[in-house]
Image (cartoon, rainbow, N blue to C red):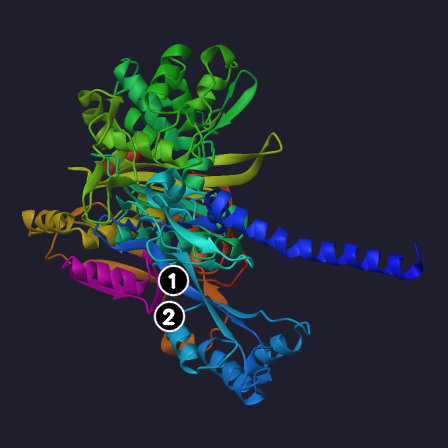
Amino acid sequence: MDERTAILSRMFIILGLLLLIPFALGFQLLRVNYFEGDELRALWNKQAIDQIPIPAQRGNIYDANGTLLATNAVDYKLAFDPKVPNNGKIGVPQDKVKALTQKLASLTDKSAAYYQNKINSAPSQSRYIVLENNLSVIAKDEIKALNIKGVILEENYRRKYTFGSLAAHALGFVNHESNGRIGIEAFYNNELKGEDGLRQVRRDPFNRIFEYVGAPKKLPRDGYSLHTTIDAYLQAILEDELKAGVEKHLATYGTGIIMDPKTGAIKAMANYPTYDPNYPASSEEENRRNFAVSDMIEPGSTFKLVTAIAAVEQGLVDFDEVFETPDNGEVVIHDLTLRDHDPLGDLTFQEVIQKSSNVATAEIAMRMEPDVFYQYARNMGFGTETNIDLIGEVEGSLAKPYQWSLVTLPWMSHGYEIQTTPLQITQAYSAFANNGVMMRPYLVNRVEDKNGNVISEHEPVKIRRVAKESTVEKLLPIFESVVADSGTGDLAQVDGLRIAGKTGTAKKVVNGRYTNRYRGSFVGFFPVEVPKYVVFILLDEPKTSGYGGFTAGPIFKNVATRIAGLDSDIQRNMKNDEVFNPLTARMPLLKGLSKQQAEVLLTNLNLPYDTEGNAGYVAQQSPEAGTEISRENEIKITLSETYSTEEGEKVKEGFAEIPDLKGMNMRQATTLLTDLGLKTEIIGSGTVLAHYPRAGEWLREGYTVTVRGKARSLNSLTQVSNQ
């Protein structure tokens, strides 16, 4: 074969191969369109069509009066693309960028330079620079009106808590996926979040999403709304007074609960320090803990309610019996020393509770078998969860009798060697206030859909009877006397309002040892005739005093006073009490009050008075507190500062005049000196017999007054009361 023939042969081969290509393409077209067309089209549809969720709206949360506490809000993220094509050129003109940054500055608390720097410092190829998050709808509209290319506005839905930190620990908060983390939001997460819907969309080769006509769609079911038992007004009162008390007494934290004893409904629940559930990450995790249900504490003397009920129902005490306590207020039990806060002398059963004697309470408890005492404590809800509708509740710790030591019974009788939660204590006193019937506490009254249809409704749950009606009738006057002038809860008194309750003071255990750090508490209910509110207050490590009556008692008083001002039924009863005998009145306790406070109190009671002295605090009063007097008799009050105007000008700033403290109890004296800016060193206990510096002398604020006292005997108390 010559060379020419070889070349032609190769050309024919190549030409033949080239002619095969159109035939192959044609065959593929026939196969795709006619032979396998349906299957391939189905496969393409399967790969190009996708389903994306349609988010359901989370349900709202309301208070007991229908006030909106939590809802959903929309805000916008603003991003900027500086490389967007604009009028045939790449990039946004600088005058447009300047207009954008200036508008943002006018809508936020940041400067235009801040936003300009964000744009300038972004990578050179960046086409998505986030300038601002959480812009409001109004701000979004103003930005959009600028009509600047390159502005990207993205819609975000978030949970909004209408009143910020109000009821934060009860409500809880949600995470970035809108799932509840703590509180009601977590417990009722399934009811609140609803069910997401689905919609069918197409995706192009670049994974961009497009809707198309006739695409199948499943609509979402929005979450149900919750109507809670929380009263926003009472919640605000509790939070205000708790914050003021924590700050005044320099406590590490405070906890408060308001409960309806008839139903178990929680009207308010607060902790301070608190947090804003709109921005939960901005607060420390410790501030987000709900101490009311998750903190285990030794309750101190508030637990004496259990001892009192058990002793009365077992017939182990006689109300006329006199309990003799040692002169030094101490007793040794199995080589451990048990002390009273002050030497209290001889006490009746009522005075044991009224003056909170640990020694006498232990004596009463040791008259019963450990199994019996344990059963009463267990029956009153200690050592088990209350089953409130909140996440994070602990059951506390109540050891079984076979685990007890020789001193467990006497120490547990006044609130040691047992771990409880604030809610358990509140529940126990609610049962006492409810004529001996314990109710389960709850926070959500009913669940509704978006159309107002009731999905479920809570019915008050009776747990058990914890005390006989006759027992409650006998003990009510005793616990009411705690809030009398001679009781440990005297600072919780509210004029015209009958209150029963108990103070609590307990040393804290740190690293397995009791320390000189205290928790002070007060729990009480009112009005005693028909109890409507049970209020519990706890302060952790108050620096001014460890006594619950001194620290938590005044907070309770302020809360109760403000609640009474909102409750027309209580106001009506208080007015009726005054009208009942318009010719006489009960002399109020004025010692320790400022001149203005005393004058306002006497004016409100329509009592005439005469004042001796120019300023300061009430040092003496006549008649004494508790005396029934005629409204026509003039009351004499003597103020601590009796200097003349000319003498007052010579007084150095930063000094305080020592008032006459003789005859006051230690709590009154401590309160008075604290308000004067002075410290107190107490030697002895009971009634003040002497103090240094003496009355009328001047002492620089912040210095210490030494106060000496001794408990009065039962005989002297009887003589005073008979005078």
Secondary structure at numbered mark 2: helix
Residue 91 visible? The answer is: yes
Q: Residue furthest right?
A: 2
Residue 507 in the image, given as x and y percentages of width and height: 51, 35
Instruction: State if disc 1 and disc 2 touch (CB < 8 Å).
Output: yes
Residue 153 in the image, given as x and y percentages of width and height: 46, 70
Which residues make up the magenta segment? 590-619
Residue type for callout 1: Val
Q: Is residue 363 left or right of residue 534?
A: right
Q: Depth check: 50 or 663 in front? A: 50
Q: Quadrant of the C terminus?
A: top left
Report the residue marked by disc 2.
137
Residue type for callout 2: Val
Query: What residue is shown at x 28% (from left), y 30% (from top)?
Result: 440
Specify the quadrant of the image occupied by residue 524: top left
Query: What residue is shown at x 46% (from left), y 12% (from top)?
Result: 401
Specify the quadrant of the image occupied by residue 619: bottom left
Dot 2 or dot 1: first in sequence order is 1
Q: Is residue 106 left or right of residue 240?
A: right
Circle 1 crowding by C-alpha within 10 Å: few under 14, some 14–19, many from 20: some
Queried whether the magenta region covers residue 603, the answer comes back as yes
Residue 538 versus residue 81 in the image, above or below: above
Q: Depth check: 59 or 411 in front? A: 59
State the CA–CA distance, disc 2 to disc 1: 7 Å
Report the residue marked by disc 1.
74
